[in-house]
Image (spheres, helix red, strand yellow):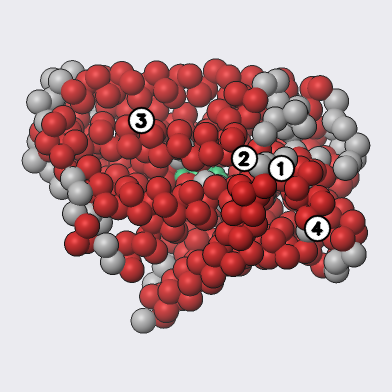
Amino acid sequence: MQAERKAQELWSHRSVFILALMGSSIGLGNIWKFPHLISEQGGGTFILVYLICMLLVGVPMMTAEVLIGRHTRSNPVQALRILSQQTGASPNWQWVGVLAIVTGLLIFSFYAVVAAWIFYYVFSLSSGLLVDVGLDQSNTFFTQMLINPDALVISHTLFMLIVLLILGAGVRRGLDRAIRYLMPLMLLLVLILLVYATQTGYFAQAYHHLFSFRPEQITSTMVLSALGHAFFTFSLGMGVIMTYGSYLSRKESIGQTVACVGVMDTVLALLVGMVIFPVLLSVQMEPVSGPGLLFITMPVAFGQLHAGQVLCVLFFLFVGVAAVTSAISLMEPVTAWIEQQLGLKRFTAATLAVLGAWVLSLVVLFSFSYFAGFTLLQMNVFEQLGALTTYVLLPVIGFATMIFTGWILTRRITQDELSMSVPFYYLWRLCLRYLVPFVIGLIFVTNLYNVSF
Ligand code: PHE
């Protein structure tokens, strides 16, 4: 067991840790991907398959990451170094931590660009720039924003400053406090939007669409998408959960906490679906996925409804809060690493991390305009980053971390840290040693196959 942290370097309460993990988990994936997946891949059947994947793969993986963080009380690089020393394994395992931090940074630079778009939309919508538009106009507005990025630089920088202010203030005064305000705000916004959705007259139809059980639709593609989504939405493979776990008090039960996060993340994703679908159905629009849903379809759909303009602003505010709570979690591992490795003050470490990320992210921001010429395999930098992280880096890091926890960490370390009842402990270990590596390997090979053909 490592040296204890001071109180200001720990979460103030277990509930804040749960909210912090929820904040990290609930992000763009829940908003622009999950509802679309459900609708396209079999409604309630997909939800059931997803829940099974979450319980057998997501929860054991998240538990493993929290365990590593809390046991070592360190950032991912140092955590893996300490544990390999304790178990006599090769010190090279720390490179998995390095890779995780780099991946988090890359995903952050992608996330920050989408966040800049979201902020830009909040300003445009509230100043009446995007009122009563049809699909064509909405499309043009979005494309114009991408190819004239000067205004975006302002919202992008604003987003970076918010992240810096939160991270720079430290765990208790920064992260903990921000989570305690932002998460209730996020939940409140979802509830307002949900009440609105019930008034559209299409709530029952949307419910039927999302939850109808169509078992004949279970296919291998469906299972793989459910697995891939569970992986991304749980923010696994980026050292995020490890770092957040390193601030958790030793009194708390890891298993229960993680299961609670899994359930809440899914419930919230379903609630978001129950907001998006009634709105789309009431104006007879098709649910698409990705940026198209958020930035092109939703403003048009809201615009056609009573009081839709105001609600659309609230919707984008909700997405903005979800992006901020995920973004801070993505930057926490690198900040903690710089702070511990170089022995710098927290604010200095956060400034260095955010400054580096800002430059990296500007390249991504300009990938639709000034750098649009840099393409590889017909993808611009924005798309390349998405593909590299999702298809290669995340599965590789996830696989390595699970092999490390399942096969290299001693039973004494894991059992002590988890203090679960014996059957649960064995179930967890079984999943981690066999099921999870097999499943990640499968996702990896299938993704590579799909990309290359
Ligand atoms: N879980 C987030 C989402 O669903 C993505 C994310 C991954 C956020 C990793 C933080 C860390 O959008």
Looking at the image, is mark 4 or mark 3 earlier in the sequence?
3
* Label 3 within 8 A of ligand 1 by Cβ: no
Residue 132 visible in image:
no
Mark 3 highlights which residue? 316
Residue identifier under label 2: 255
Residue drawn at (70%, 30%) of the image: 252
Asked if marks 2 and 1 touch (Cβ < 8 Å), the reply is yes
The residue sitting at the bottom extreme is: 453
Of the residues under marks 2 and 1, which one precedes in the sequence? 2
Characterize the local packing of mark 1: few (<14), some (14-19) or many (20 or more) Cα atoms within 10 angstroms.
some
Assign the C terminus to one quadrant of the image.
bottom left
Q: Three-letter amino acid code at disc 1?
A: Leu
How far, Cα to Cα, is label 4 from label 3? 46 Å
Whole-percent x and y of residue 363? Answer: 54, 54
Identify which residue is drawn at 28% across, 23% down. Answer: 193
How many angstroms separate mark 1 from mark 4 (CA)?
13 Å
Q: Is residue 391 left or right of residue 17?
A: left
Label 2 and label 1: CA atoms lie apart by 7 Å
Residue under numbered circle 4: 410
Marks 4/3 in contact by CB < 8 Å: the verdict is: no
Q: Residues within 10 Å of mark 2 (few under 14, many from 20)?
A: many
**Which residue carries the number 1 mark?**
418
Q: Amino acid at mark 3?
A: Phe
Residue toward you, 98 or 166: 98
Where does the image place residue 343, in percent across and percent down from the top left? 90, 40
Label 3 sits on a secondary structure element that is helix
**Tag 4: residue type?**
Thr
Picture layout, residue 46 above or below residue 251: below
Tag 2: amino acid: Gly
Q: CA distance from mark 1 to mark 3?
A: 39 Å
